[in-house]
Image (tube, rainbow, N blue to C red):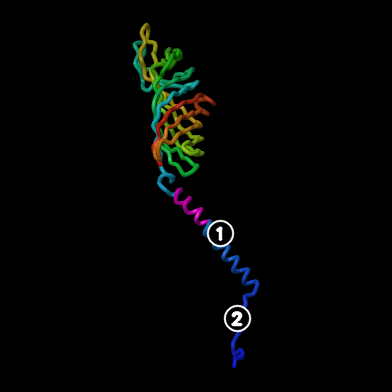
Amino acid sequence: MSRGPRSGARAPRRRSPARRVRGRLAALATTLGALALSAVVPRAAEAASPARGSGYELRLGLGFAATSRIPTLRLSEDTSLSSRELVSGTLPTAGGFRGLGGYADFAYVVRPRLTIPLAGLGFYGAVGDHAPVRSAVDGTLATVQPWRMFAIDLLGPGLGLRLTRRRYFFEVAARVGAVVYGGKAALAAGRDAVDADVVGIAFSARAELSGCRRLDPEQRVCLSLAPRLYEVRPLAGASLNLSWVWGN
């Protein structure tokens, strides 16, 4: 004889529609989370790698600098003349300066877009034709000789933005600094002239526009244009530089 269903057996439970919906949503969320992690983790690892991380940069370059006005010069020390014991004071000047030279610059880069120029130093010697500038110091006639002058460029801190495109990047920065001008002036001493050392300093605010090509993960070559936004007067000049960059 066949046996009927036991009276004590329980019928299988059926999940409510709400539970089934919650289960499917949980499975969908888990799948989406796994997909998101698979996309984000490799990018994060790449960004944290030494080749793309934040770090310092050293830049060495050669350049041409031109300014339309040099600052007021002064005698670096008292000068003895045949007609007078000592001459000291300042020389009002006019005219500009053109020079060739080199520089070194140090910056910190916060990947991928922010750059922080820290400090730099450059030296430029006069090139080309410079007309003599006639002036006077302490009642004595003086002739400033720009072709015997030099400029020491003291680069200060700044802030910049960088746009990277494959092996190339473009950068715009603004920074402050100072330029020290030095040279010679001829002081009239009767029929003769006495050479005297002169020096002047000017505050500088400039922009820097650079285009660079990456040669390998740590080296780049850059061409830069740096307008002098203010140096003795607004829009005083510019410099054009070719540089080699090392860094992350």
Question: Mark 1 or mark 2: which is in front?
Answer: 2
Q: Main secondary structure of the magenta part?
A: helix
Q: Which mark is residue 73?
A: none
For mark 1, does the 10 Å Cα neighbourhood hold few (<14), some (14 to 19), or many (20 or more) residues?
Answer: few
Q: Amino acid at mark 2?
A: Pro
Of 177 and 58, nearer the camera is 58
Q: Which mark is residue 12?
A: 2
Q: Please state the horizontal and vertical placement of residue 63, each as a whole percent of the image.
A: 42, 25
Q: Which residue is mark 1?
A: 32
Q: Is residue 55 above or below residue 14?
A: above
Mark 2, secondary structure of its residue: loop
Mark 1, secondary structure of its residue: helix
Of 126 and 11, nearer the camera is 11
* For marks 1 and 2 on the same chain, the one whose residue lies earlier in the sequence: 2
Which quadrant of the view contains residue 130? top left
Residue at the far top in the pictured view: 191
Residue at the far front in the pictured view: 1
Asked if the residue under mark 2 is in contact with the one under mark 1, i.e. CB atoms within 8 Å, the reply is no
